[in-house]
Amino acid sequence: MGAITLEQARAHLNLWLEAEMAVATGQAYTIGSRSLTRANLFQIREEIKMWEQKVEGLEAIELRKGKRRVMRVVPRDL
């Protein structure tokens, strides 16, 4: 399985944001004898944080065009 792309990360983030909205409008409800309880809001927010970090990281890589900068420093006593 390859690395996740920026578009995929954004799509996942959007899905979790939509899930948060759905839970915020009603955690649980009952119609007749049937009931629905949505996912834990804390877990959803943790997923949102994770995907936000992933998107930010992928955007940073995209800005550098995938190149990582490495610097070498040699301390010298003159």
Image (cartoon, rainbow, N blue to C red):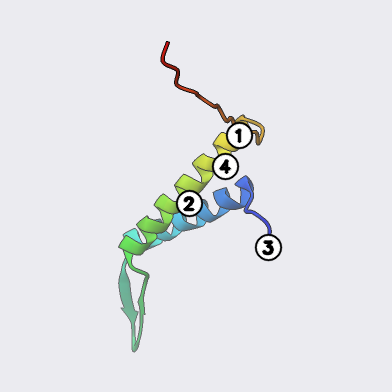
Circle 3 SS class: loop
- Contact check, label 3 and label 4, Cβ < 8 Å: no
Residue at horizontal 51%, vertical 52%?
A: 14
Q: Quick one: 7 or 26, which is closer to the camera?
A: 7
Residue 62 versus residue 8 in the image, above or below: above
Q: Between marks 4 and 2, how big is the CA–CA gap? A: 10 Å
Report which residue position mark 4 lands on.
58
First-in-chain label (1 vs 3): 3
Q: Residues within 10 Å of mark 4 (few under 14, many from 20)?
A: some
Q: Quick one: 31 or 58, which is closer to the camera?
A: 58
For residue 21, side relative to residue 4 (left or right): left
Q: Amino acid at mark 1?
A: Arg
Report which residue position mark 2 lands on.
51
Circle 2 SS class: helix
As drawn, the residue found furthest toward the front would be 78
Report which residue position mark 3 lands on.
1
Q: Amino acid at mark 4?
A: Leu
First-in-chain label (2 vs 1): 2
Mark 1 or 3: the one toward you = 1
First-in-chain label (3 vs 4): 3
Mark 2 or 1: the one toward you = 1
> Residue 75: x percent and y percent?
45, 21
Report which residue position mark 1 lands on.
68
First-in-chain label (4 vs 2): 2
